[in-house]
Structure formats: structure tokens, C-alpha cells
Image (cartoon, rainbow, N blue to C red):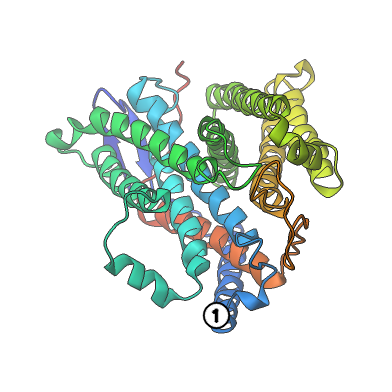
């Protein structure tokens, strides 16, 4: 087995190796994600050639299902890197062996999400032209492009400090961990601010969306990372250890609680403000979106995972963590769908407290139905992310052979 032993203050006595499992399990999973990529490429070409006309998006709902997938992947990337941060910045030895895989997953999720967004401007040539122009620092989108590229750069250098045995590289280990933590906050805050700064939409226009997205990133990232680490260690017949399972079981419900708190404050604030009563009624007591909110986000995505992780009946059960992570991911995806699609489907209030009339879309609740190509494009982004992860684990020494039972 090709492996290395690193003897330093950060990762003492931790032995890493490449993923050497070449059995049918590995190649079946890799083939599955590769097929998703091929389907995504087909959908990408179809939408690129025909334009947004073949999607369910229109001039009222300009962000559709691909944006839900993309933002989920981007926000999850920020949360996935938190595992490395805990080990580096806060010195939690249980998390230190997991840092490499955490950063690999974070970078892969971010790349997958950004690729899905390439068609946001309609044509690839438009993206190239945008890159050629000067940066408009008044635009939150310009800020995010800087934050996304900076995050990838930090991940690459941060991984280098973890994997390189040169003493000078190790001296940068903790400073880069701190930089990673600060940059993640800014990145996720910037993503949430995309919606928070849009004052024209009644369901957006709230500064609390920034901390809400930060909390959601921890939920998404921890859930995705939990599924990855458990499935990888199970397939490679490694012992994950009770300490890691216990830590993840404690963290995930706390992050879910934080999301619920910010959601509660957000809706309570909107209910207090008369101008937001209409959109709150639409989301909380309407038809489709209220069902998604209460049953999808709250029950499936929040309450059930907390019962599975905090309930005494499932104590130290790995299956409970797997189930809770899957439910949290489903609930998080629904949460983003409500924010992105639900926020656009409610009519624009162009002139509050005034009666207006025109021949186009005044007071109309906008319908949106995602097409197959939009779903395939989104799943293609997921396929790209996890193919990168699997290739990274095969090439580089990302996986610890044994996890120390450290607290």
C-alpha cells in the first residue's frame, strides 16, 4: 500500500493512503456519476443551442431549477470545508484526519455548482465577454465571482500545507485554516446577500438571509460530508470510529436548530411588517409552497433529522446519521426551492399602497414548471462534483487508514 506518515503537531501519527478499492462497488458508483455528467452535457448543449426558451424559466421567473442545484452545491461547499476548519483552527483532533477529504469535497462541490451556472447568461460567449470587462464593485454578483475563485485558491494552498512535509508549508497550516474560515463566511454571506439585496421581491429584501445562508451551509455541508465519509469508509472496509460518528451526530442537529431559528425570526419579522403580509400568507398558508415549507422543509428536513439524531432510541446508530443526512439534504433543497422559485412567483409590488394597471403581469402569480433539461443539467453538476471527489481519492492520499479515537 502506498502511504505516508506525517509526524507533526497537527496530524500526529495519522497515516493516509489513496483509495485502492477497484472493485465493482467503486466502478458502479463512478459510472453512475459519469452517466449523470453525460446527461448533463446533453442538457447543456440543448439549452445552449435553443436558449432559455426550452426551459420553464420566463421573464418573470428568471432563476429556475438549475439555480437551485447550483446554489445548493455552492452553499454545501462552504459547509463541507467547515470540517477542516474545526480541526485546524480549533484544534479538535477528531476532525484533523478528516480535513483533506473535507477540502476536496468543498472544492468539488463549488466547481460543480459553478459549471451549472455557466448558462445563466444564456451563452458561453456572454460569460467570456463578462470576464473581459471591468468589474462592477456595486454588483453583488461581481463580489461573488471574486469570492468563489478566491475560495478555490485557498483550498488548493490549504490542501498543499496538509499534504506537503516541508516545514515551511506546515507553518502556513493554521493561518490558512483561519483564512479558509473567514473566506467561507464571506462567500456564504455573499450568496445569501444576492437575495437579501433584492428589494423589489417581497420574499427577499432581508438582511437576515445572510446568516440564514451561513447556517444552512453548515447543515448542507455536514450532511453531504457525513454521507461521503460513511459510504467511503464502509466500501473500503475502514473503521470510522465512534468518536467521528458522535461528533457529526451532535453537530448536524445544532446547525438545523440554527437554521430554524433564523427562519423563525425572518418570518416573524415579515409578519410584523404589514407590507409583507401578502407574501407570508402565500408561503405559509397558500397551496404548493406552504406544503413544501411545512411538510418538506420543517418536518422532513428539520424535525425528523433532529429526532433521529437526538432521540435516545437511535443512539450511536450510523444508519440514523445516514437517514438524517439524507432528510436534511432533501429539506435543504426544498428550502432553496421555496426561496428562489417561491420568491419570484409572488407578484412584484412596483408601487406599494397604489393602484396600478397595465396589460402585462400586474398582480399575477407566476407559474413555473422545470423541464427535464433543467433537472439533467443540475444532476450533471452533482455528477461532476462527485466524479472529481472519487478521482481525487484515487490519485491523492486523502483517506486516513485509521481514525484515532480522540476528543
Q: How far across and down, in percent of the image, does residue 397 sit?
A: 35, 47
Relative vertical location of residue 246 with respect to residue 215 in this rendering, above or below = above
* Image position of 407 (left or right of 40): left
Residue depicted at 67% across the width and 52% down the height: 348
Q: Dot 1: within a 10 Å radius of its alpha carbon, few (fewer than 14), some, or many (20 or more) residues?
A: some
Residue depicted at 44% across the width and 45% down the height: 106
Q: How far across and down, in percent of the image, does residue 401 sit?
A: 43, 37
Asked if residue 20 can be seen in this view, the reply is: no
Q: How far across and down, in percent of the image, does residue 372 sit?
A: 71, 71
- Rendered image quadrant of residue 151: top left
Foreground pick, 364 / 184: 364
* Image position of 307 (left or right of 333): right
Q: How far across and down, in percent of the image, does residue 16 sit?
A: 36, 40
Foreground pick, 220 / 290: 290
Asked if residue 55 can be seen in this view, the reply is: yes
Residue depicted at 74% across the width and 41% down the height: 279
The residue to which callout 1 is attached is: 45
Amino acid at each position: 500500500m502506498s502511504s505516508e506518515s506525517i509526524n507533526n503537531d497537527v496530524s500526529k501519527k495519522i497515516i493516509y493512503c489513496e483509495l485502492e478499492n477497484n472493485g465493482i462497488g467503486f466502478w458502479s458508483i463512478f459510472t453512475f456519476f459519469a452517466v449523470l455528467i453525460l446527461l448533463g452535457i446533453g442538457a447543456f448543449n440543448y439549452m445552449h443551442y435553443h436558449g432559455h426558451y426550452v426551459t420553464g424559466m420566463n421573464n418573470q421567473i428568471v432563476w429556475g431549477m438549475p439555480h437551485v442545484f447550483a446554489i445548493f452545491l455552492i452553499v454545501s461547499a462552504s459547509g463541507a470545508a467547515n470540517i477542516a476548519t474545526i480541526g485546524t483552527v480549533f484544534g479538535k483532533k477528531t476532525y484533523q484526519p478528516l480535513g483533506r477529504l473535507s477540502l476536496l469535497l468543498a472544492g468539488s462541490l463549488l466547481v460543480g455548482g459553478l459549471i451549472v451556472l455557466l448558462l445563466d447568461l444564456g451563452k458561453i460567449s456572454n460569460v467570456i465577454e463578462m470576464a473581459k470587462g471591468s468589474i462592477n464593485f456595486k454588483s453583488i454578483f461581481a463580489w461573488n465571482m471574486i469570492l468563489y475563485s478566491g475560495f478555490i485558491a485557498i483550498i488548493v494552498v490549504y490542501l498543499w500545507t496538509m499534504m506537503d512535509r516541508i516545514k515551511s508549508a506546515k507553518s502556513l497550516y493554521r493561518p490558512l485554516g483561519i483564512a479558509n474560515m473567514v473566506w467561507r463566511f464571506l462567500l456564504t454571506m455573499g450568496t445569501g446577500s444576492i437575495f437579501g439585496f433584492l428589494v423589489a421581491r417581497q420574499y427577499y429584501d432581508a438582511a437576515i438571509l445572510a446568516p440564514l445562508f451561513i447556517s444552512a451551509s453548515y447543515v448542507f455541508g455536514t450532511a453531504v460530508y457525513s454521507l461521503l465519509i460513511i459510504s467511503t469508509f464502509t466500501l473500503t472496509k475502514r473503521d470510522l470510529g465512534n468518536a467521528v460518528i458522535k461528533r457529526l451526530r451532535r453537530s448536524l442537529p445544532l446547525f438545523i436548530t440554527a437554521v430554524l431559528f433564523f427562519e423563525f425570526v425572518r418570518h416573524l419579522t415579515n409578519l410584523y411588517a404589514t407590507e409583507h403580509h401578502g407574501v407570508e400568507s402565500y408561503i405559509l398558508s397558500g397551496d404548493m409552497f406552504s406544503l413544501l415549507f411545512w411538510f418538506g422543509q420543517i418536518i422532513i428536513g428539520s424535525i425528523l433529522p433532529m429526532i433521529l439524531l437526538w432521540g435516545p432510541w437511535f443512539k450511536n446508530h450510523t444508519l440514523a446519521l445516514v437517514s438524517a443526512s439524507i432528510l436534511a439534504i432533501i429539506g435543504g433543497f426544498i428550502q432553496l426551492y421555496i426561496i428562489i422559485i417561491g420568491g419570484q412567483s409572488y407578484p412584484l409590488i412596483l408601487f406599494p399602497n397604489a393602484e396600478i394597471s397595465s396589460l402585462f403581469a400586474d398582480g399575477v402569480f407566476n407559474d413555473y414548471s422545470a423541464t427535464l433539461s433543467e433537472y439533467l443539467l443540475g444532476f450533471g453538476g452533482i455528477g461532476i462534483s462527485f466524479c472529481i471527489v472519487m478521482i481525487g481519492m484515487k490519485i491523492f492520499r486523502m483517506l486516513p487508514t485509521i481514525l484515532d479515537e480522540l476528543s
